[in-house]
Image (tube, helix red, strand yellow):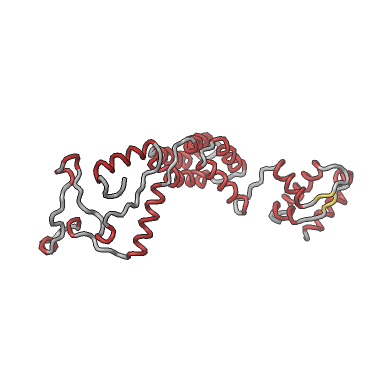
Amino acid sequence: MDLRKLIQQAIEKDDWLKKKNIEFKEYEALFTISGGDARKLLNLVELCADVIKVGEELTDKKVMDIAQQRIALYDKSGEQHYDIISAFIKSIRGSDPNAAVYWLARMIEGGEDVKFIARRLLILASEDIGNANPTALVMANATFEAVNKIGYPESTLILSQCAIYLASSAKSNSATVAIGEALNAVKKQGDLSVPLHIRNAPTRLMKNLGYGKDYQYSHSYDNNFSPQEYLPKELAGTKFYDPGKNAREEELRKFLKSLWKEKYGY
């Protein structure tokens, strides 16, 4: 049945809707929100009728305003699905635990798969927190394991705990930037040769060719460190990892600088 005809029949035959004298000037918002589902469409029509004044005309904007205020818009296969998960992730990245639990609640109420939510938290723990707080990854992984075991409704508590913890954590994307820079180098430079001294030498022939020759075993030196070159000669001195500006990584920066001095600019 044509959806407009369905709406018109409901308005004409339903005694309560007839009293409201409801009139839709536009239909795009109704069809978009309901996704073409007749039951959802009629529920939305009733919701609009419950809110407006008798005889008030309904535009797309009015319908959207009513829907945003009165129902939890959530479509796991549509645009709203991606908007809400985006808001959730950006709230955590932005260190706002209050917004994070709100958008989490929207997903929970919408019946989102707990594994999908936990998987995104696991990715975020490395992408946006990383070495600023390595425990974040441990927490997110434990959350993923836990929700896989118990599901709803108990998973709600675990997801909330993890989302709040991640949102309240120090942030760093230095690991994300580092691997991005390294991948770009690989794409631009191709398969550069591994320095001979750090190649594996399982056979006599390889040893005779110089594989592994002059390799300095780190644990044989002071502080378990030798300032030998580990990158291909074309990339010698290239800094891919630049520690973030947070307490944890500032300690890493100091440590790396104590080892490498001015080589990488730490």
Residue 224: quarter of image? top left
Residue 95 in the figure: left or right of residue 207: right
Residue 137, placed above or below residue 193: above
> Total number of numbered labels?
0
Relative image position of residue 89 (x, y in whole percent): 52, 45
Residue located at (19% from left, 58% from top): 199
Relative image position of residue 59 (x, y in whole percent): 79, 51
Residue located at (40% from left, 51% from top): 177
Residue located at (44% from left, 37% from top): 170
Quadrant where the image shows the C terminus: top left
Quadrant where the image shows the N terminus: bottom right
Residue 115 in the figure: left or right of residue 223: right
Relative image position of residue 50 (x, y in whole percent): 80, 41
The answer to whether residue 15 is seen in the rendering is: no
The answer to whether residue 102 is seen in the rendering is: yes
* Relative depth, front residue between 130 and 188: 188
Residue 117, placed above or below residue 198: above
* Relative depth, front residue between 110 and 134: 134
* Relative depth, front residue between 102 and 252: 252
Relative image position of residue 234 (x, y in whole percent): 27, 61
Residue 201, placed above or below residue 266: below
